[in-house]
Image (tube, rainbow, N blue to C red):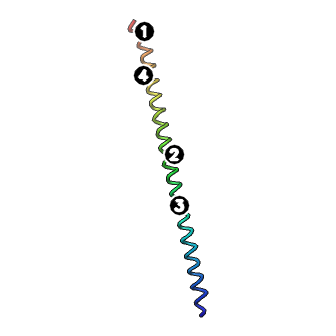
Amino acid sequence: MPYLPTAALIVLGLAVLVVLLVRTVKVLRAFRQTASMVATNTQDRAGLVRARSAALRVAFAQRRRHPENQ
């Protein structure tokens, strides 16, 4: 029965490997969700900055044209 300790170690090693893989997959899922949330938030803020800068360009253009209308 010298194969019994080897088989037990192989089964134990596979069990540990499965546990580590499951934990790693959970962590990667959480990381992917967080990265997606951060990317969405960043894109939203960048869109707001673009909209504000466009509004400022329009306002400055209107102020420059205003004296010509008088």
Q: Which residue is mark 1?
A: 67
Mark 3–mark 2 CB contact (< 8 Å)? no
The first of marks 3 and 1 along the sequence is 3
Label 3: how many Cα within 10 Å (few below 14, some 14–19, many 20+): few
Q: Residue furthest top?
A: 70
Q: Camera-side residue: 66 or 4?
A: 4
Tell me the amino acid under the disc marked 1.
Pro
Tell me the amino acid under the disc marked 3.
Lys
> Residue at (49%, 37%) from the top-left corner?
45
Number of marks in the image? 4
Q: Which residue is mark 2?
A: 38
Q: Is residue 14 above or below residue 33?
A: below
Label 1: how many Cα within 10 Å (few below 14, some 14–19, many 20+): few
The first of marks 4 and 2 along the sequence is 2
Say what secondary structure mark 4 lies in: helix
Q: Which residue is mark 3?
A: 26
Image quarter where the C terminus lies is top left
Q: Label 3 vs label 2: CA separation?
A: 18 Å
Tell me the amino acid under the disc marked 2.
Val
Residue 37 x/y as whole percent: 50, 47
> Residue at (47%, 28%) from the top-left corner?
52
Which tag is nearer the camera, tag 3 or tag 1? 3
Residue 51 x/y as whole percent: 44, 30
Q: What is the number of the mark on residue 58?
A: 4
Label 4: how many Cα within 10 Å (few below 14, some 14–19, many 20+): few
